[in-house]
Image: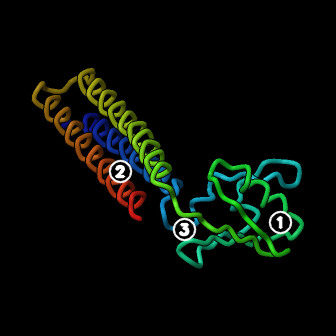
Amino acid sequence: MSSSLADIVKHSREQMQKSVENTRKELSTIRSGKATTSLLDTVRVDAYGQQVPLNQVASVAAPEARLLTVQPWDKTLVSAIEKAIQASDLGLNPAHDGTLIRVPLPALTQERRKELVKVVHKLAEEGRVGIRHARTEGINRAKKAEHVSEDDQRHSEKDVQKLHDDAIKQIDQLVKAKEQEIMEV
């Protein structure tokens, strides 16, 4: 296989892995029954005149299965952080004692669990679309490659297809694991 075909396959692999990693990251922000610090990654706080991610103004910990604690580095931001968590679409109700914000996680209703599973499937489909796009791009680039035999082109197309199948399997495994985590009572 010529170096340009190898480069095409390598590029396709990188693109597909980015889609898988992005999906993994997105899924980690979806709330399941357990407390996880990544749950608050999407929360943005109005601090110092601008919107900043929560993790840039406070440390988040999960000391218990159903509790998150937020420790602001600047005590003046306690109420702004509390408001930001309440305003997020996570359905959380934080409370503070002046320095530490406690965020108890209410038990998920069966209805809410089903909604979250739908969100998981939507995010997974976005990941699959990215993987399919990388496959299409890789195969098209392999077909357009110059000075290579048809056999080499076919081999690189098969390699790209195999990468695609593996990446889709990874996403399916992520979805299955997240779905079990959400539905676990």
Specify which label sits upstream in the sequence, 2 or 1: 1
* Farthest-out residue, front: 110
Q: Secondary structure at mark 3?
A: loop
- In what element is the residue under mark 2? helix
Which of the pair 81/54 is nearer the observer?
81
Give, as a three-letter code, the residue at label 1. Answer: Val
Task: Answer with left or right where residue 1 lies relative to residue 72.
Answer: left
Real-space Cα separation, disc 2 to disc 3, in angstroms? 18 Å
Mark 1 to mark 3 CA distance (whole Å): 20 Å
- Classify 147 as above or below 3: above
Q: Residue at x 69, y 62 (%)?
A: 55
Residue 175 marker: 2
CA gap, disc 2 and disc 1: 35 Å
1 or 3: tag closer to the N-terminus: 3
Q: How many marks?
A: 3
Residue at position x 34%, y 28% in the image: 137
* Direction from residue 5 to residue 90 in the image, left or right: right
Element class at badge 1: helix
Q: Which residue is mark 1?
A: 78
Say left or right for 84 vs 125. right
Q: Position of residue 131 (x, y in %)?
A: 35, 37
The three-letter code of the residue at mark 3 reads Ala
Quarter holding residue 145: top left
Mark toward the start of the polypeptide (2 vs 3): 3
> How many C-alpha atoms fall within 10 Å of the one at disc 1: few (<14), some, or many (≥20)?
many
* Residue 126 x %, y %: 42, 36
Q: Residue at x 85, y 74 (%)?
A: 98
Rendered location of residue 149, percent (x, y): 13, 26
Image position of 62 (left or right of 171): right
The residue where tag 3 is placed is 35
How crowded is the residue under tag 3: few (<14 C-alpha within 10 Å), some, or many (20+)?
Answer: many
